[in-house]
Amino acid sequence: MKTLIQLLSLIISIGFCKVSVFGQTSRDQEAIVYFGSGVQRSGSGAVISSAAIQNVLASYGLNSSDVLAAYPDFNETDTLVSDEYGNTYKKMNKAKVFVIITPNVTVRNQLVNSLLAQTEVVFAEGNGHGESQTIPNDSYFTSQNNLYNPSHRDYDIHVTEAWDITTGSANSIIAIIDKGVDITHPDLSAKIAGGDQTYQLETLGDSHGTEVAGSAAASSNNAVGVSGVDWNARILPKDYTNGPSSLQGAILMNRKTEEAVDFGTNVWTLVHSYHLADDNGNLSPYSIMLREGMAYAYKNNRLSCVAAGNSQGQHPNVANYPGGFDMGILTVANCGDGSIINPGSTQGDWVDIAAPGDNVYTTNWNNRYAPVAGTSMAAPQVAGVASLLKNYRNDLYNDDIIQLIERSAVHVSDGNFPATPNIAYGYGRLNARAALDFLRTPYTLQHFTQTGGAVYATTNNVKMILLAFPGVADGTYIVNKIEVRTTVTLPSTFCSVNGVWGVGLTSTGYRNDGGSCYGEGFCDVVAQSGNTVTLRTYIYEISTILGQPIGTYPVASAGAVRFGYSVLGISIGNPVVSGSNTICTPTTNAPFAVAGSTGISAVTWSATPAGLVSFSSASGFSTTVNRVGSANGVATIKATMANSCGTNSLIQRNVVIGSPAPYGINRQGSNCIGSVIGDNVFTIAPQSDVNLSDYSFLWSYQKGLTNGFLGSGTSVSKKFTQTGTYTVTVEGDNSCGTAPDIVISFTLSNCALTTIEAYPNPANNTILVTLSNPGAGANVDLKTNSGSQSADLIKAIVLYDVAGKVAKEMRCVNSKIS
């Protein structure tokens, strides 16, 4: 037992020693590597079976003890997850992600390049650490001018007007991916939904996460401190500095994002007010680990609101990550006090929206409040508005919220929604009230899908990293990216269209990503002309790196692609005129109304032809209708609707007045008699759009002095066996009385054949047919088989009556027609 205890002590000491050494290393010394093969996880360490990988490490003085499992607790069997809509998504296999500790950043960068040349490596990149986007501000303001600026209302985000519509709900949770949140703060303590409840102000020296949380969702209307944008949303702190030593930098940021998503479906919004940087404050390049985390959130219908960064002065137009990811997120700039972009706010075509970020008064450490500045303070305001939108209408997709916020923004230069975003402030300054107004009358937002498209273009032989990609293992592949397009016609119920956009979550196609793809659904609009819209997405034809075909994903052909899209506009709905089918008396007072309408401001009533009906009121959404005297006929009741688009729409309904006969008789049958011919069928043929449900019908016929009853209902049949002229009469009755009789006449003849002669026989190319007593309507159809080697080129002669039925068929056998 003593030996065992000593052995355990040794293992524990070695383990803590390793963690201690790792903990003292800089993130700049760490390489993040995804090994597709050749390296396996063993506890928190690694077993390297690939000689090539061992040789690369050895060339830099490294070995397996310098390789640590980035996700030692990741379950490889748990890579499939389902979202709230029942869709299944794949996680990246993080059991294959490792951290390699190097002596310095120079060796780290050289090692990454060497590893990227190895076939066992899916990706390799340098690690970094998170830096907050707050700029310290010495000024102190006692009002939140970003939310309400009484001196310049055009500068604030108009959230006070939005609060007239909704102040949010505790059902909404905003995740704060940051350096922890002070959960004891009086304006935050009642809002904490769970998450990481460790706060490390003493070691980190700032209260950044607390400031972000207060800006998004501080307790409001409680006579204490400040107001958050969403008064009632709860807060989920996720501390990207709080984790095992092997889970730091981009790895821990990825993990905290995934944890926030997995916390529950009501974590609708995530705030990322940080960027990845090295120890000297230099911006880290594109990070696959960060990007995969953002993709995981997107695929689960979460919206990530990300600070653009404050490095425009030091690094003009250089992306901060994750803010530089141009994929299903909202990257937020700082427009100062609301009037002009802060000169430090990072600029680029990845910027989507701007919000006031200077002197934002918010929660601070030790139960305090302070004015702070930066894109970090702008991003949580956007997250708060996104939370209000999702709470107001729960079926919104993340793409919907992005578009609502962008399309409602105030464009600083001219107030119009630009076709492309400005690199400084994206589509404009955040406007909370205008975004919510898009979800209220007279606007409507509807979701649609269309299946089937056509190949538009193909980009061949693209080398790509596919991660969390359904149907294939994580790895590097050769991809033919097939662009698929379709054209849709928007519903005629929209009298005005404010916007059309693609919805990735309801589409079966992928993004046109450059060197990597993470399995996100994608659809976008490439052209719109009036009510005609062209949509596109991409399917991937995938082969191994050696060119062996694997398959086409996510569907096998362009015809199977599903395009998901949303339409925002003013709709009149599907209005109809409701009311009676029949009006009998001048005192019926039959009620009529416009039903199923939206966006209608007024209705005017009329009828054609004149003189059949009168209205109790010629305007209004409802009226009553009466018969004029003893008038008979069909009246078209018309409702002319003034809609919110400033145009008029017309709907109408045909109504029977009195006892007219708004129908005719349709006869189907031959003019021949005999057993070959079959029945005559007589059917009521109503006038267009006339409802005859109030009518009953009786049928009779007459031939000379002979007459008979045919039956009742809307259709009867009869086989006649005598030649001559027949008259068929139908009598109609409705609740008002008896309608005039409707009559048709027809003549039947004896169409029987007596003789037929065809010559020459056998024939070459022409045959002459002579009929004796062919009767009315008999036709000859010659069936030949000119390709046959038989001497009998004419195989048969078939005679049809005028109804298309076979009257006689003669076949050629042994050169004789019989």
Image (tube, grey):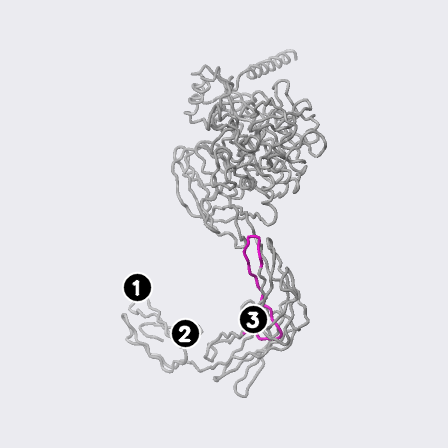
Q: Quadrant of residue 777?
A: bottom left
Q: What residue is shown with label 2?
A: 800
Residue 651 counted in the magenta span: yes
Q: What residue is shown with label 1?
A: 787
Q: Spatial distance from mark 1 to mark 3, Cα to Cα?
A: 64 Å
Amino acid type, label 1: Gly
Looking at the magenta stretch, what is its main secondary structure? strand
- Asked if residue 113 lies left or right of residue 345, the reply is left
- Residue 444 position (above or below residue 669): above
Work out whether mark 1 precedes mark 2 in sequence or the reverse, and give the earlier one.
Answer: 1
Residue 272 appears at what percent x and percent y? 57, 30
- Helix, strand, or loop for circle 3? loop
Work out whether mark 2 precedes mark 3 in sequence or the reverse, and give the earlier one.
Answer: 3
Amino acid type, label 3: Pro
Q: Which residues are magenta?
A: 641-663
Amino acid type, label 2: Tyr
- Helix, strand, or loop for circle 2? strand
Badge 1, how many Cα within 10 Å: few under 14, some, many 20+? few
Of residues 500 and 372, the one nearer the viewer is 372
Taking the spot 58% from the left edge, 15% from the top edge, the residue there is 20
Asked whether residue 425 is in view, the answer is yes
* Label of residue 609 in the image: 3
Asked whether residue 289 is in view, the answer is no
Of residues 416 and 203, the one nearer the viewer is 416
